[in-house]
């Protein structure tokens, strides 16, 4: 994309009734009550300074949140904010397939805070189920391979390990080799184990 033809979505912010905005099913970001109160205070004092990033689902005529779920929740949970804003949220629309929207959500969240590990594991599982490789996840979600492996382990699904190469694990020696090893160790003054 050249700088002349690409225009960031933030330059096309639109006002959308909060009733037409819906949460996605995969956001792993959690905000503790004190931070939610701080977010409320911030929006109360400064207004909405950042748009909610959404994907427009034409078939359902709704805006699915990619980033900004907690800002959206503030409007739903605080009548004073809803009334002041006339129930309208500032929305910046991106048009990407689901896997790329998931990646966008993770990038936005990772740049700001922490994630719920179980939800992150579910995202890794969903991305693998739709055919995304560990390399794709690493590149698009900014994760190291060992982090992806840990998240896969949490789900416990063997299918997630299809792209993983494992080294040789410890193998038990046969009885003859074990006995020979013990005799060698005993012969050089070491105590057998």
Image (cartoon, grey):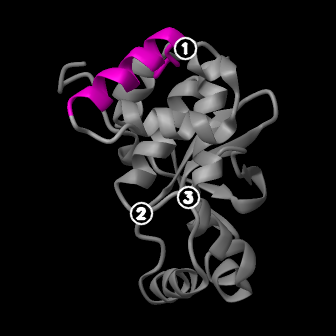
3D distance between C-alphas at marks 2 and 3: 8 Å
The tally of labels here is 3
Mark 2 or mark 1: which is in front?
A: 1
Which image quadrant for residue 73?
bottom right
Mark 1 or mark 3: which is in front?
A: 1
Which image quadrant for residue 71?
bottom right
Q: Magenta segment, principal secondary structure?
A: helix
Label 1, on which residue? 175
Q: Please name the residue shown 20% across and 30% down the image.
A: 188
3D distance between C-alphas at marks 2 and 1: 53 Å
Q: Nearer the viewer, residue 5 or 151?
A: 151
Instruction: In the rendered view, tell whether residue 41 sits above or below residue 86.
Output: below
Residue extent of the magenta highlight:
169-188
Helix, strand or loop at label 3? It is loop
Q: Which x, y percent locates residue 87?
A: 70, 70
Which image quadrant for residue 17?
bottom right
Label 3, on which residue? 29
3D distance between C-alphas at marks 1 and 3: 53 Å
Q: Are marks 2 and 1 in contact (CB under 8 Å)?
A: no
Label 2, on which residue? 113
Q: Are marks 2 and 3 in contact (CB under 8 Å)?
A: yes
Helix, strand or loop at label 2? It is loop
């Amino acid at each position: 994309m050249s700088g002349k033809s690409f225009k960031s979505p933030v330059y096309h912010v639109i006002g959308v009734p909060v009733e037409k905005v819906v949460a996605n099913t995969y956001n792993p970001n959690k905000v503790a009550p004190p931070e939610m109160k701080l977010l409320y205070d911030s929006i109360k004092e400064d207004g909405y300074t950042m748009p909610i990033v959404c994907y427009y689902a034409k078939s359902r005529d709704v805006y699915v949140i990619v980033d900004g779920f907690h800002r959206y929740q503030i409007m739903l949970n605080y009548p004073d904010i809803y009334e002041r804003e006339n129930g309208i949220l500032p929305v910046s629309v991106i048009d990407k397939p689901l896997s790329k929207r998931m990646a966008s959500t993770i990038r936005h969240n990772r740049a700001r805070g922490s994630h719920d590990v179980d939800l992150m594991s579910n995202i890794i599982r969903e991305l693998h189920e739709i055919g995304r490789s560990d390399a794709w996840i690493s590149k698009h979600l900014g994760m190291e391979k060992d982090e992806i492996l840990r998240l896969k382990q949490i789900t416990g699904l063997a299918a997630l390990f299809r792209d993983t190469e494992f080294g040789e694990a410890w193998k038990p020696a046969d009885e003859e080799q074990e006995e020979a090893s013990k005799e060698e160790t005993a012969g050089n003054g070491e105590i057998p184990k």
